[in-house]
Amino acid sequence: MSTDADLAALMAQNPGTVLLTQAATPTEARLINDRIAAAGGTERPPVSLAGIPPALLDEPDLRLVPVRVAWLPTEHAGRPATQLTALMRDPYHPSERQQRRILARQPGRAIVLTGEPATVDELRRRWVETTEGEADADFAGYVARRATLALDRAEYQLRGPRYKTPSLVKEEILASRRFRAGLRAVRRTDGEAPSLAEASQILDELAAGWSRRLIDVMPVIGRLIFQRGFDPQIDYDEAQVERLRAAMARQPGILLWSHRSNLDTLVLAAALQEKGLPPAHLFAGINMAFGPMGAIMRRAGVIFIRRSTADDPVYKYVLREYVGYVLEKRFNLSWSIEGTRSRTGKMLPPRLGLLSYAADAYLSGRVDDLLLLPVSVSFDQLHEISEYAEYARGASKKPEGFGWLYRFVKAQGARHYGKVYVRFGEPVPLSAFLGPPGGPVATDPAARRLALNKIAFEVAWRINQGMPVTATALLTTILLAMHGAALTFDQIRMALADALDYLASRAIPQTASVPALAVADPVRATLDTLAAGGLVSCVADGPEPVWLIGPDHQLAATFYRNSLIHFLLDTALCELAVSRASGSDIDPVEAFWAEIGWLRDLLKFEFYFKDREEHRRQVREEMARQAPDWEELLRAGPTGADTLLARMQPLVSHLLVRPFVEAYRLVADVLVHDVLTAPADDAAAYEAEVIRRALGLGRQYVAQRRLRSSESVSVLLFQTALQLMRNRGLLEAGSDIAERRGVFLAELRDLLKRLDRIEDLAIRRYIRDAVRDPVE
């Protein structure tokens, strides 16, 4: 990049240079000419990029230097003075009248930039290499694009990493030799080859056009929305921010984030801006591209993609090439690894589609490496959980539109929801899992899919491990454990004391509000906040107030409880494995590990597990924390196992695992007693019918108190139950299908009995401790 004073030196060193000027207004053209004259002039007159004479490109040794004017916005504290008025008046592209005013009052805001020079011969060689280079008439367009891109790079160096934005993406992709060759090999579903025009239409739908003013303004608008209900300051781990900054400087990165709220993208954009980090192209569902908002969001770097692309090979090809091009040019990307919002509070299974396209870019050598950057965005409370609870009860998802947006923003300002937390996990390099480009993973589809699954689970694991426990999550977990029964303030504090000890012993990340719960006032303040939101009820008519989560709010409250469930999962599995080992006919330690494996398989669609050996190490570590002599106690027989279970604390499996097992049991009940078998032609309708019947059965069981609470009566859990049963072949027709379903139902009932036993033990322990150690 050269600016003003460097222009003279550049021309003095290369007197035969031709300047290619890019001026949007007469004022810019005059300014460029004035600066050229001040620098001593040129032997050959400047040429406008908008009309390069063909004869100019017949001189192989001619050196071409692109030139444009960059306008600097006014600054505040070293940063652009971002104002919402920038939506109407672009400080980076002022009108001609504004340009004249700036030159009269603040001439330093106008910088004449020069891009990287190149000779005609160099440009022609690149043109032939990267495009099909058949028509000389196309060469002038190629030169103009390369000049524009060189100026964009110069302007990025001037403005800083936040303004590194891709341009001419559609034009560059369509002109690419690689893209055209690949497109000729694609066949539509009707067997016909797609045209370049068809690919162009898809790129029009995909291509996001960056606007520097929207880079500044959209995070401000987003902050105004989420700050209506949250503290103005986002909570960060500063060491993680600096690690992310260093990572994004080394390699292009893909920000993969947990998705709990429609606020996630607003928060992440504000966080990147606040910390001076480069922006990232955000992938979003095309359902969010409604009205003028879609056009604005595209200009802010959002790429809208179709929800389903399985039946459109042309769209899939163009999307893959689009992702590859953006990454090849070292721009960052961003999307939810879950693909959609989690309405349960825990992470959903990862989606591999976009990640697979990123892997293609790496394995084909388009990038040296890619860094996957895990991000967790979490909140003390969310107004959306009431919507999630309704969806879990069977309600339909409301379509997005201006009415939906108005209601969302209005609800956001209804009350104070606490703080927002952003955590950046340790980066995951693709090369560590995929090996070198062109290696075995690149040529073996099975090995590639296995590697992608491992990568996705590793990223999700790091997101989970970085997500801090909040005071809301802790208190809702305690109150949900009572299945609708109320607790006094002292009882809540006693349960909190055990929970805080457990979190400390495991070094589990937590927000600053959690350690504060050791003191009475923050506990009462958190309860008051939950009560103000209607999630927790306070009954204050008796001699002392009591708090509870009633049946109508249990489904909503599970969202917060499930945000910490992954930290407690190994503890829960250990309890259940010990309870199984106590009555086993084989070696108790072998029975323990067999049960761990069975539970992993049962819950594999609910939770992220490390590979088996690593998970065994984690389980051993948890058992050693509970009792260093755990294997000796198990081998001592039922009495030793009972002693071991009695020593384990806190007991959590009945709180965490039961809702999933009860939901699976309801679906299994429907399949066993209604003898439903999936038809070959309409699996979706069949599964919808199973869910409908499971909802009805669940409501009946709740009324009969055959379920501990209503939280297991959830469409979301039933969907996972069907996924598990499909994986086990329990939805297929077959002569033994009724028997196999019956065996599975019996296994679930046995597991629920063991959960009952652990819950009884937990209640007895709680009563004993309450008598022995009352809270002061």
Image (spheres, rainbow, N blue to C red):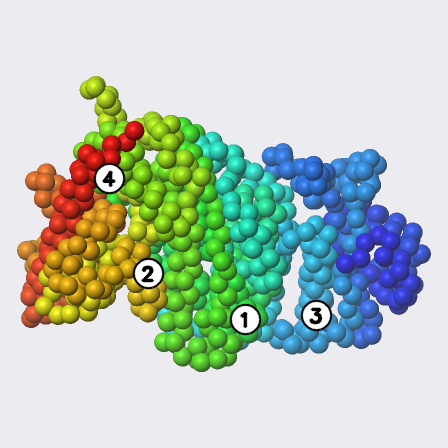
Looking at the rendered structure, the secondary structure element under dot 3 is helix
Which of the two marks, 4 or 3, is nearer to us in this view?
Answer: 4
Q: Residue at x 17, y 54 (%)?
A: 643
* Residue designated by label 1: 179
Q: Nearer the viewer, residue 571 or 552?
A: 571
Give the label, 1 or 2, closer to the camera. Answer: 2
| Mark 2 and mark 3 residues within 8 Å of each other at the beta carbon | no
Tag 1 secondary structure:
helix
Q: Residues within 10 Å of mark 4 (few under 14, many from 20)?
A: many
Q: Secondary structure at mark 2?
A: helix
In the displayed structure image, the side of residue 164 where residue 605 appears, left or right? left
Q: Please tell me the numbered disc located at residue 621.
A: 2
Please, what is the three-letter code of the amino acid marked with disc 2? Answer: Glu
Q: Decide: marks 2, 4 in contact (CB < 8 A)?
A: no
| Quadrant (top left, top right, bottom left, bottom right) of the N terminus | bottom right
Q: Residue 444: x and y, percent?
A: 40, 79
**Element on which disc 4 rests:** helix
Regarding residue 759, the answer to whether it shows in the image is yes
Q: Quadrant of the C terminus?
A: top left
Q: Residue 8 location, x and y as percent?
A: 89, 57
Instruction: Locate residue 110, reporting x and y percent.
Output: 79, 45
Q: CA distance from mark 4 to mark 1?
A: 55 Å
